[in-house]
Image: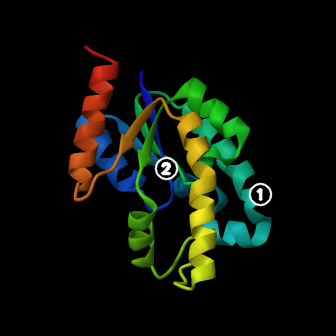
Amino acid sequence: MMKIALIGFMGSGKTTIGRLLSASLGSAFLDLDDEIMRISGTSSGEIFDSLGEVGFRRMEEEALRLSSSSPGDLVLACGGGIIAGEGNRRILREDYVSIWIDVPFGEIERRLFEYPEGRPLWNPSAEPRQVQDNQALYLARLPLYEESAQLHYRWQSPEAPAESAAIISQMLKNLFPA
């Protein structure tokens, strides 16, 4: 049984790549943010508004713990902040093969500006102060992704999601030869 967790900053393509990777591996796929919304009956933005980031992170850790005990193979797309809590980092190290999808900040910024609905911790403003805040969050998380990942995939322009999934699949085959 293999449980794979895709980690990386918001907008790195974890969900898109995860769906493709799970199909190629014949594994189940789960988006952890979608699972949190299913369990809570509300959106992540509403959870942040009502419970704050701390409340959201508690729900996230519980959903991560539950998914780690699910039967069968699984590709899990984690939220960008999954690595914020030591408990989550421990679960990722112990129960999953964690793969960091590492995308440069400029590409993240480009991708996230395409989504006007935004993300709870991303300010879509192009004002220099907001860009600095977004970049500071990105930079603060990099060492935590590195600490949490067993494999590190660095996205290269112009790789499409299918190419990224194929590269990650090959990385897994190299780590776990048949």
In the image, residue 19 lies at what x, y percent?
33, 49
**Mark 1 highlights which residue?**
55
Mark 2 — residue? 8
Q: Is residue 65 left or right of residue 154?
A: right
Disc 1 marks a residue whose amino acid type is Gly
Which residue: 55% across, 84% down?
A: 125
Precedes in sequence: disc 1 or disc 2: 2
Q: Which quarter of the image is occupied by the N terminus?
A: top left
Front-most of residues 70 and 108: 108
Disc 2 marks a residue whose amino acid type is: Gly
**Image quarter of residue 160:** bottom left
Tell me if I can see residue 83 in this picture.
yes
Marks 1 and 2, how far apart in space? 21 Å
Q: Residue at x 51, y 29 (%)?
A: 96
Image coords of residue 167 (percent x, y): 25, 39
Relative to 12, say whether 172 is above or below: above
Mark 1 against mark 2, which lies toward the viewer? 2
Residue 63 falls in image quadrant? top right
Residue 25 at least partly seen: no
Q: Residues within 10 Å of mark 1 (few under 14, many from 20)?
A: few
Circle 2 crowding by C-alpha within 10 Å: few under 14, some 14–19, many from 20: many
Pick whichever, 111 or 91, lies toward us: 111
